[in-house]
Image (cartoon, grey):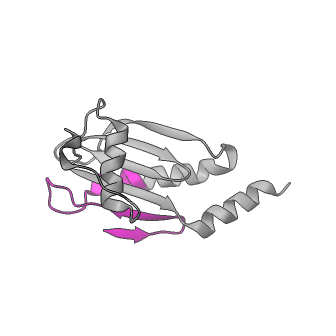
Amino acid sequence: MTKTDQTHHFSETTCRHIGGPCPAMTRMLRALAGALDKARPVTQEDFEICGESILDGCSRQCPARFFATHDRIRVFCDVSAEADRRKLDQFADALLSPRSTGFPAGQTATYPCALGEALPKPAHSAATALQQALPY
């Protein structure tokens, strides 16, 4: 599923447990996008926040890992804190990135039950960067 708001383009996979987009992951992805958008004026371009959480409202109490920068936000559902970030990103790239080269299916032992990605809209990123550059 893909959606767009004023600041980001959102892409989400179907949750293997519920057979549709995960509402708990959607809320987390949107909250992270809102937080990063508000933090943009007071943070550097290389700012990153990452962590683990239990998805609030998920009937299975799925653990989630998230990695959020000004360039991309990703949430991976039902993965452990020890899951290899590089392999999670390769998996997400294979599903969501048109430039992905893919990877062998047996390369990772951990596949998320769902994942979501938020990318800033180009016009929004450029406008925010311009606002930051202007003296007040």
Residue 53 position by quadrant? top left
* Residue at the (34%, 48%) spot, across then down: 90
Q: Is residue 119 above or below residue 45?
A: below
Residue 1 in view: yes
**1 lies left or right of 124:** left
Q: Residue 118 location, x and y as percent? A: 44, 58
112 or 131: which is nearer to us? 112
* Residue at the (49%, 54%) spot, across then down: 33
Q: Is residue 65 magenta?
A: no
Q: Is residue 20 magenta?
A: yes
Residue 56 position by quadrant? top left
* Residue at the (23%, 42%) spot, across then down: 107
Residue sticking out furthest to the top: 82
Residue sticking out furthest to the right: 135
Q: Is residue 18 above or below residue 52?
A: below
Residue 136 in view: no
**121 lies left or right of 76:** right
Quarter occupied by the N terminus? bottom left
Q: Residue 127 location, x and y as percent? A: 69, 65
Residue 51 position by quadrant? top left
Residue range of the region highlighted in magenta in the rendering: 1-29
* Residue at the (67%, 64%) spot, across then down: 126
